[in-house]
C-alpha cells in the first residue's frame, strides 16, 4: 500500500527498503518525551499538555479518515478501531462502559505505546492518547468529546483508562 497521508507518511516501501516500516518503541518514546519536555521548558507544562492533546486529535482524525469506515455502527466501528490500534501496535483497546447514546464512554488501553512500563510519577501522561480518542470520536460522530485519562501506568494502573464525554 502506498501511503502518503497528506505528506506526513510518504512511501515507506520505497524509502525504507532495508529497514522496513517498524522501529523500536524506545525511539517513539524518546521523541515523544523529549518533545514534551522541550515544549514544557519553553512554554510551561500546561501548554505542553494542550499541544500534545491537539496533535493527538489531529492523528486520531487522520487515522479515522485513512483507515476506518465511519459509516459503521458504533460496535463495529469500535471493533475496527481496536483492530487498527492492534495492527499499528498502539495498544489493546477495550470499551469498558458506554451508555445507550454513546455519550459517556469508558475506554481502556492496555500495553499502551505511550506509558506502559513507565516509572510511577503519580500523574497521567497520555495526553496524546486523550487527543487521539477525541479526534477519532469527533471524526466518527461529528461531535466534540472531552476525553480525560483517569488511570495510567505512570499513576500506578496497569491499563490506561479514559473517560469520554460529550462536552
Ligand atoms: Zn497512560
Image: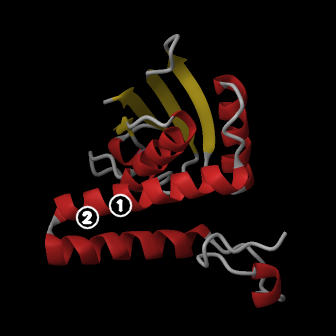
Q: Identify the residue at image location x=69%, y=74%.
A: 4
Question: In the rendered view, would you say 32 is above or below 16?
Answer: above
Q: How is the image coloured?
A: secondary structure
Q: Identify the residue at image location x=58%, y=26%.
A: 95
| 133 lies left or right of 41 | right
Question: Toward the viewer: 82 or 143?
Answer: 143
Q: Position of residue 41 (x, y in %)?
A: 18, 76
Q: Position of residue 87 (x, y in %)?
A: 75, 53
Q: CA distance from mark 1 to mark 2?
A: 6 Å
CB under 8 Å between discs 1 and 2: yes
The N terminus: image quadrant:
bottom right
Q: Secondary structure at mark 1?
A: helix
Question: In the rendered view, would you say 11 is above or below 101?
Answer: below
Question: In the rendered view, would you say 16 is above or below 41?
Answer: below
What is the number of the mark on residue 24? none
Q: Is mark 2 within 8 Å of ligand 1?
A: no
Q: Identify the residue at image location x=55%, y=40%.
A: 109
Q: Position of residue 46 (x, y in %)?
A: 18, 58
Mark 2 lies on residue: 48
Residue 100 in sight from this viewpoint: yes
| 76 lies left or right of 117 | right
Q: Position of residue 159 (x, y in %)?
A: 50, 38
| 136 lies left or right of 87 | left
Question: In the rendered view, would you say 164 is above or below 1?
Answer: above
Mark 1 lies on residue: 52
| Residue farthest top in this picture | 100
Amino acid at each position: 500500500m502506498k501511503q502518503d497521508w497528506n505528506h506526513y507518511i510518504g512511501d515507506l516501501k520505497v524509502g525504507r527498503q532495508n529497514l522496513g516500516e517498524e522501529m523500536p518503541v524506545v525511539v517513539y518514546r524518546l521523541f515523544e518525551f523529549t518533545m514534551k519536555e522541550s515544549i514544557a521548558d519553553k512554554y510551561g507544562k500546561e501548554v505542553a499538555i494542550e499541544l500534545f492533546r491537539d496533535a493527538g486529535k489531529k492523528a486520531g482524525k487522520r487515522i479515522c479518515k485513512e483507515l476506518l469506515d465511519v459509516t459503521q455502527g458504533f460496535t463495529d466501528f469500535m471493533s475496527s478501531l481496536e483492530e487498527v490500534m492492534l495492527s499499528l501496535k498502539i495498544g489493546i483497546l477495550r470499551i469498558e462502559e458506554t451508555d445507550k447514546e454513546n455519550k459517556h464512554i469508558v475506554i481502556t488501553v492496555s500495553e499502551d505505546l505511550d506509558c506502559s512500563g513507565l516509572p510511577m510519577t503519580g500523574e497521567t501522561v497520555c495526553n496524546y492518547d486523550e487527543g487521539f480518542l477525541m479526534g477519532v470520536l469527533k471524526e466518527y460522530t461529528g461531535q466534540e468529546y472531552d476525553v480525560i485519562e483517569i488511570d495510567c501506568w505512570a499513576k500506578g494502573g496497569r491499563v490506561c483508562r479514559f473517560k469520554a464525554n460529550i462536552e
